[in-house]
Amino acid sequence: MTQTRIGIDAGGTLVKVAYHDKEKIKYQTFSSHKMGDVVSWLYNCFDNPKICVTGGKSQVLANDLDSHVKSIVEFDATCRGVEFLAKHHNLSLGSDFILANIGTGTSIHYIKDGEQQRIGGTGVGGGTLLGLSYLLTKKRSFNEIVQDMMEGNRESVDLKVKDIFEGTVPPISGDLTASNFGKMNGYIQEEPSIPDILASINGLIGETVVTICCQAAHRFNTQSVVYIGSTFRSNPLLKRIIEDYTQLRERKPFFLEDGEFSGAVGALLSLD
Ligand SMILES: Nc1ncnc2c1ncn2[C@@H]1O[C@H](COP(=O)(O)OP(=O)(O)OP(=O)(O)O)[C@@H](O)[C@H]1O
Ligand SMILES: [Mg+2]
């Protein structure tokens, strides 16, 4: 009997698992704060599997497992997983592109001919979405946050360029955000609703990441920006903000199906 191969990306917030089941790759997600759940699931579902781990919390998981596990560098695993998933879903990314992994924080890479180079990042990411949402609305559940923000209107929170340039034509598009959360300072009297605040937090994250990625794309002279990470889960609003803003900055955005499992898939592939 062949051993089941399992790739695990244990990140700052979520543990992503990719494993072979017959001809298919299957996925599973756990909270990084409940590593015991990952261990019990592995013991209950598999008999002596071959495991490769990656990600910032991979050592915590490896220590909790009795058996020996292989470990690989997260950025290489992610890059390998991205290339594999793009091919798998018939998505042509071209020979070079910027890759943004919007996880707990955001890591930004330049990928050329399958080789990755980490070129920067920002602490503004999915952890910021959860953190600011909690501080401003007391909501803790990611699913509730992304659900509620769908009803939100950023116009009551964010200041646009056209709000500043009154009675004159602005030098840049009036629809651009001049200041995220900027309307709170004397521009409106009424309190924004909870969905408005949540939608604006999402906007802050999306626009910050796009700004950095498009500057990187310019620096590396590439047209494409690929976005992955669990922050996109059930979050079509973030995808839309990022898609529109990347296009406005004259770059081509790509979203990878199952992209949040790139690191886990890369780890899995390294066992072949
Ligand atoms: N069920 C969930 N519980 C908590 N956060 C979730 C959930 N689903 C999606 N998210 C979002 O995904 C983000 C984590 O994304 P991801 O799994 O890509 O990061 P990570 O790998 O854990 O972190 P990092 O790579 O920075 O170490 C969270 O910060 C949150 O915004
Ligand atoms: Mg990660």
Image: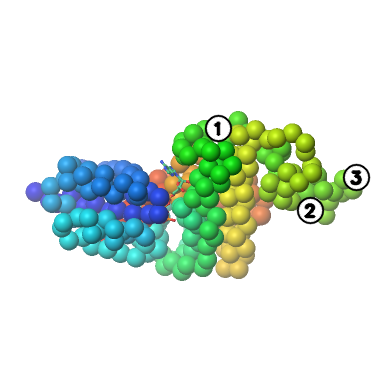
Is residue 240 visible in the rendered image? The answer is no
Q: Residue at x 21, y 44 (%)?
A: 40
Is residue 15 visible in the rendered image? The answer is yes
Q: Is residue 130 above or below residue 12?
A: above
Do callouts 3 and 1 mark residues in contact (Cβ within 8 Å)? no
Q: Position of residue 262 (x, y in %)?
A: 38, 53
Q: Nearer the viewer, mark 3 or mark 1?
A: 1
Residue at disc 2, secondary structure: loop
Q: Is residue 73 above or below residue 25?
A: below
Q: Is residue 218 above or below residue 177?
A: below
Q: Pick whichever of labels 2 and 3 is earlier in the sequence.
A: 3
Amino acid type of the residue that numbered disc 3 sits on in the rendered structure: Gly
Q: Label 1, on which residue? A: 148
What is the crowding at mark 1: few (fewer than 14 residues within 10 Å), some, or many (at least 20)?
some
Query: Cα distance, mark 1 to mark 2?
Result: 31 Å
- Can you tell which quarter of the image residue 31 is in? top left
Q: Position of residue 108 (x, y in %)?
A: 50, 61
Residue 172, label in figure: 2
Q: Position of residue 227 (x, y in %)?
A: 50, 52
- Outermost residue, left side: 1
For the residue pair 71 and 271, the one nearer the viewer reads as 71
Q: Residue at x 73, y 44 (%)?
A: 184
Q: Residue at x 83, y 54 (%)?
A: 171
Query: Cα distance, mark 3 to mark 1?
Result: 35 Å
Residue at disc 1, secondary structure: helix
Answer with left or right where residue 20 lies relative to residue 213: left
Amino acid type of the residue that numbered disc 2 sits on in the rendered structure: Ile
Query: Cα distance, mark 2 to mark 3?
Result: 15 Å
Amino acid type of the residue that numbered disc 1 sits on in the rendered structure: Asp
For the residue pair 162 and 159, the one nearer the viewer reads as 159
Q: Residue at x 40, y 63 (%)?
A: 75
